Amino acid sequence: MRIVLIGPPGAGKGTQASLMEEKYHIIHLSTGEILRREIQRKTTLGNQAKVFIDKGQLVPDKLLLELMEQRLRKPDCERGYLLDGFPRTIPQAIGLNNILRHLSTRLDLVISLTANEDELVNRLVLRGRNSGRSDDTPDVIRDRQKVYWEQTAPLLEFYREQGILHEVDGIGTINDVFSRIVEVMDALC
Ligand code: AMP
């Protein structure tokens, strides 16, 4: 299956994606993780991305689309994948649909993890104490939330219109939320 996981920063995308990877043996591709790795390696892409990530802004669509086009063409993606953190803008979603059309495939499912903003900021401030991530500071967290509502939330309508959006309540324990995701997955498999 080809699945996209969407949710505001702190909704638990990464955690749930890892559980899905384990249960369904599906490749988990997190663009945030890929970019952080590029930054550590000090590659050209990493250096370009760092400027945006540290400010809580999105890395330009062009860079993300080039990165993901290459990644999705690799043989290990032939049997499906779970995209975590991509697409994040309408141009990325349109670009992804074009890439998939060239590969004669399409998305099967988009899961939107929902949560209210106060809960999310609290979770991220806590995570920031342990994660060491340069973008988990209170000011940058607030900027990332704003970016989500302005640039990523419009994707929900985009995918609702395509009939593949499923909303899952992201509030509760990790296991509660995962059970809700499993229900959605099992209904489709
Ligand atoms: P994440 O780990 O998904 O929260 O991503 C961390 C940061 O990486 C984001 O705040 C963005 O700066 C950048 N990033 C990750 N995925 C994307 C994307 N699809 N488009 C643009 N920027 C991205």
Image: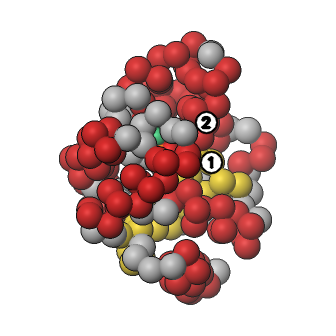
Mark linked to residue 63: none
The image quadrant where one finds the C terminus is bottom right
Rendered location of residue 165, percent (x, y): 39, 69
**Residue, x 44% and y 56% (percent of image)?**
126
> Is residue 136 toward the left or the right of residue 38 in the image?
left
Whether residue 116 is situated above or below residue 186 in the rendered picture: above
Mark linked to residue 29: 1
The residues bearing labels 1 and 2 have C-alpha atoms spaced at a distance of 8 Å
The residue closer to the viewer here, 102 or 18, is 18
The residue tagged 2 is 34
Farthest-out residue, top: 44
**In which image quadrant can residue 41 be found?**
top right
> Is residue 168 toward the left or the right of residue 108 in the image?
left
Which of the two discs, 1 and 2, labels the residue nearer the N terminus?
1
Farthest-out residue, front: 129
Rendered location of residue 12, percent (x, y): 49, 63
Number of other residues with Cα within 10 Å of mark 2, as a class: few under 14, some 14 to 19, many 20 or more: few
**Residue, x 57% and y 13% (percent of image)?**
44
Rendered location of residue 73, percent (x, y): 68, 38
CB within 8 Å, label 1 to label 2: yes
Of the two numbered discs 1 and 2 in the rendering, the one whose residue sits closer to the viewer: 2
Is ligand 1 less than 8 Å from the beta carbon at label 2? Answer: no
The residue closer to the viewer here, 121 or 88, is 121
**In which image quadrant can residue 106 be found?**
bottom right
Whether residue 53 is situated above or below residue 108 in the rendered picture: above
SS type, badge 1 = strand
The image quadrant where one finds the N terminus is bottom right
The answer to whether residue 92 is seen in the rendering is: no
Rendered location of residue 117, percent (x, y): 26, 62
